[in-house]
């Protein structure tokens, strides 16, 4: 048996336990609600978390690259990037897969499985950075887009173009 | 009935363990986290309004520079409001903590922070109420452990900071109230809490400065009359390029039929500016076809009312301008633009604050004869009701093809849907100006709509994490219709929404654009004498007019 086959065989157990471990990163009172399997629009965090973890397990059981892992992680990382988590806490749920795997996966695959999870963790860090950059960019550009653009069109403010700035430097 | 649980199975599900921590213990939980709070109100803005304790302060510093007797001020403030507002008293007493509201709040669903469950957020204030104002609370606090039994706690500085943090994580959207079996309106609890904060100078700047601007110069952005006029004239130039027709509006025209007031965001902030151009086209059309005389005002140049997020008195001061101007100009009634909270103020508060506006007429659409009895007392009609009425009577000539590139869905704004029941008119207008319309899932629209996450003065930049977390439930539904039906445009009738949802889309569903309903009306409406249009109001090619690459 290969590790991929082992992942496929244990998909449901892995998903169930990994999902619970991920939801348990929220405060206990919230985890009770976010862990419920209800309509996805009534519980987006729970639904998106479950779907994303499932996608990751499918990827690990088939072919994956750093890019496909990162893309698949996006929905859940995008949520955790705006919640009250430190960077470490935001991606900690991926490490939980190691503990889950230890109890479920064949011990012969332990080392290989850990390496796989390490790759998911690295992809997670990349995506977290990307989401945080998105947030900072939104902060930086929002007011400009909303107000400055309108003023500029009306000729109420005049923004210097790059060449103007370079020109003034020269003079 | 095999699915039914046996008593033993049911008992197995009960968690008998002690809670891991006490929610009333603030020492561990009050962490005012950057990204989640808004900057403190500027002293000058607080001063302009004559509100108490104007001084520079910073929420993340230890010392909030409160008056020495702040506890006494708040105690008296709560007492006064309990006597003055029956709702507040009932909402403090009647909650049985059933939890029906717990998972209905977009901020709870998005942040996962239990103190954003409406019940627990309200409990932050209710615990103080129980301690200081109820007989049971007063008796029990004399017994060891009694305070905890009563769910009561004294008003300490940590309790105050916690309340401040969480009552500025509520957008007063009222979704929770839809699900409350007692009809508790948590928004009103937030409104009271914010009023109390203002008694000791604890407002946020994104509310206080717009209020101060509006009070002094007439609109939230502090744009002076000549600049307001310049912007509209600039739109007129753009519209002439697009349509070949001069859509110059009236300003302060005495004796006009209708005074039009819209949020200043429509005049100054994209993409609201395109909605504003839609209004100009509509008024030009109505003038040319039916002789209807609509005037704008640079004095009443703000439909929104951030006073609503400050105190009842402040809301009243700002609201009064609309009616003063309508009286001065001698118009028949007021037409209001696409705005959210403006309509809750008009629909639920105006009449008892500054009304009755008996110097105005009950609004009647002179073109169709429709009498707007829903506005019989306030004399103010929402523009989507007005336009829907015109369309229903076949009074507008529309070319839907000009919006053929738009695959629409509609976001019900909290205040217009839950605050005044405006649900079908915007949809009716959309369907008449655009062929492609798909609803988001039923538990996310109409009365059940999810907030944009930035309402009630929380649309600042510094609290972006809070806003994006609060936007998650709306974004999840939007993403669904984008993926399922190819929706590329989110229609809305609120100025805050037009700004906030644009940012929401950028983070969560970047393929979707936000548009006001009257932007689509402006595109579709065929003006008398117009040239063949090749561009929409965004000056992008109309469907079929794209240049071949």
Image: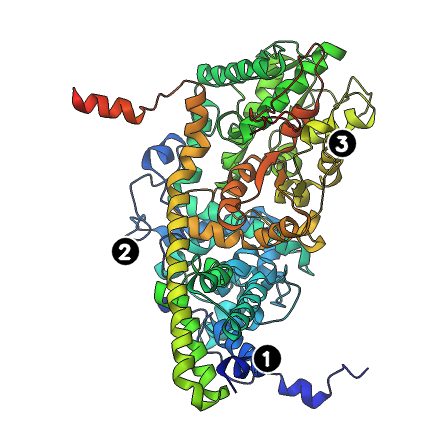
Q: Given this view, does label 3 or label 1 mark the residue nearer the observer?
A: 1
Report which residue position mark 2 lands on.
B62
Q: Given this view, does label 1 or label 2 mark the residue nearer the observer?
A: 1
Q: CA distance from mark 3 to mark 1?
A: 48 Å
Report which residue position mark 3 lands on.
B432
Q: Is residue B325 visible?
A: yes
Would you place residue B484 above or below residue A105 in this image?
above
Residue B51 horizontal/vertical position (percent): 40, 37
**Mark 3 crowdedness (10 Å alpha carbons): few <14, some 14-19, many ≥20:** some
Dot 3 lies on which element? helix
Residue B458 horizontal/vertical position (percent): 47, 44
Q: In the visual, does B186 lie left or right of B526?
A: left
Residue B372 horizontal/vertical position (percent): 77, 28
Tag 3 near tag 2, CB within 8 Å: no
**Mark 2 crowdedness (10 Å alpha carbons): few <14, some 14-19, many ≥20:** few
Seen from the viewer's position, the closer of residues B44 and B298 is B298
| Label of residue B305 in the image | none
Residue A127 horizontal/vertical position (percent): 41, 59
Residue visible at 51% across and 59% down in the picture: A75
**Mark 1 crowdedness (10 Å alpha carbons): few <14, some 14-19, many ≥20:** few
Task: Report in which chain the residue with disc 2 lies.
Answer: B
Report which residue position mark 1 lands on.
A12
Seen from the viewer's position, the closer of residues B215 and B81 is B215
Dot 1 lies on which element? helix
Q: Is residue B378 visible?
A: no
Q: CA distance from mark 1 to mark 2?
A: 49 Å
Dot 2 lies on which element? loop
Seen from the viewer's position, the closer of residues B411 and A62 is A62
Q: CA distance from mark 3 to mark 2?
A: 56 Å
Tag 1 near tag 2, CB within 8 Å: no
Using the rendered image, report if marks 1 and 2 lie on a common chain. no
Q: In the visual, does B536 lie left or right of B384?
A: left
């Amino acid at each position: 048996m290969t590790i991929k086959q082992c992942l496929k065989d244990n998909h449901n157990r892995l998903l169930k336990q990994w999902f619970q471990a991920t939801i348990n990163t929220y405060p206990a009172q919230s985890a009770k609600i976010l862990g419920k399997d209800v309509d996805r629009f009534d519980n987006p965090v729970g639904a998106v978390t479950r779907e994303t973890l499932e996608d990751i397990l499918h990827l690990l059981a088939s072919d994956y690259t750093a890019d496909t892992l990162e893309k698949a992680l996006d929905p859940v990382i995008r949520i955790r990037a705006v919640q009250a988590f430190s960077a470490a806490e935001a991606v900690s749920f991926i490490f939980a897969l190691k503990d889950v795997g230890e109890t479920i996966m064949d011990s012969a695959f332990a080392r290989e499985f850990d390496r796989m999870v390490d790759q998911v963790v690295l992809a997670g860090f990349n995506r977290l950075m990307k989401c945080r950059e998105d947030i900072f960019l939104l902060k930086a550009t929002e007011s400009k887009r909303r107000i400055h653009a309108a003023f500029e069109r009306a000729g109420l403010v005049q923004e210097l173009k790059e060449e103007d700035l370079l020109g003034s430097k020269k003079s | 009935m095999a699915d039914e649980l046996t008593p033993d199975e049911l008992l197995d599900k009960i968690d008998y363990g002690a809670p891991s921590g006490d929610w009333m213990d603030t020492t561990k939980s009050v962490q005012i986290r950057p990204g989640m709070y808004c900057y403190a109100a500027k002293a000058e803005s607080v001063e302009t309004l004559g509100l108490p304790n104007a001084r520079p302060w910073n929420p993340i510093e230890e010392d909030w520079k409160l008056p020495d007797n702040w506890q006494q001020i708040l105690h008296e403030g709560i007492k006064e409001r309990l006597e003055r507002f029956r709702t507040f008293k009932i909402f403090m007493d009647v909650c049985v903590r059933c939890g029906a509201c717990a998972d209905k709040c977009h901020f709870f669903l998005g942040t996962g922070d239990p103190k954003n469950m409406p019940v627990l957020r309200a409990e932050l204030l209710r615990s103080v109420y129980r301690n200081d104002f109820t007989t049971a609370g007063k008796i029990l606090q004399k017994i060891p452990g009694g305070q905890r039994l009563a769910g009561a706690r004294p008003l300490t500085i940590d309790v105050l900071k916690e309340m401040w943090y969480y009552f500025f994580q509520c957008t007063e959207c009222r979704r929770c109230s839809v699900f409350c079996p007692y009809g508790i309106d948590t928004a009103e609890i937030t409104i009271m809490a914010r009023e109390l904060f203002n008694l000791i100078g604890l407002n946020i700047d994104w509310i206080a400065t717009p209020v101060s601007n509006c009070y002094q110069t007439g609109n939230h952005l502090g744009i002076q009359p000549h600049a307001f006029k310049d912007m509209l004239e600039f739109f007129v130039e753009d519209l002439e390029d697009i349509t070949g027709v001069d859509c110059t509006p009236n300003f302060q025209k005495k004796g006009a039929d209708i005074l039009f007031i819209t949020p200043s965001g429509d005049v100054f902030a994209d993409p609201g500016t395109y909605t504003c151009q839609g209004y100009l086209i509509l008024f030009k059309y109505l003038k040319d076809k039916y002789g209807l005389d609509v005037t704008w005002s640079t004095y009443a140049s703000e439909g929104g009312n951030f006073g609503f997020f400050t105190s009842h008195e402040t809301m009243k001061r700002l609201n009064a301008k609309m009616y003063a101007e309508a009286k001065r100009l001698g118009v028949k009634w007021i037409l209001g633009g696409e705005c959210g909270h403006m309509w809750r103020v008009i629909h639920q508060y105006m009449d008892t604050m500054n009304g009755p506006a008996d110097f105005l007429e009950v609004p009647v659409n002179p073109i169709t004869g429709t009498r707007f009895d829903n506005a019989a007392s306030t004399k103010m009609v929402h523009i989507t009701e007005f336009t829907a009425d015109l369309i229903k009577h076949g009074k507008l000539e529309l070319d839907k093809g000009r919006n053929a590139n738009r695959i629409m869905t509609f976001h019900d704004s909290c205040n217009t849907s839950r605050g005044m029941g405006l649900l079908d008119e915007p949809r009716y207008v959309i369907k008449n100006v655009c062929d492609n319309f798909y609803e988001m899932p039923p538990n996310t629209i109409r009365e059940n709509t999810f907030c944009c996450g930035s309402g009630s003065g929380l649309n600042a930049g510094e609290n972006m994490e809070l806003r994006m977390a609060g936007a998650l439930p709306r974004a999840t539904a939007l993403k669904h219709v984008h993926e399922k039906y190819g929706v590329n445009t989110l229609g809305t009738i609120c100025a805050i929404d037009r700004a906030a949802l644009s940012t929401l889309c950028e983070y969560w569903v970047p393929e979707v654009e936000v548009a006001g309903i009257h932007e689509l009306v402006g595109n579709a409406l065929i003006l008398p004498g117009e040239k063949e249009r090749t561009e929409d109001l965004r000056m992008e090619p109309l469907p079929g007019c794209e240049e071949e690459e």
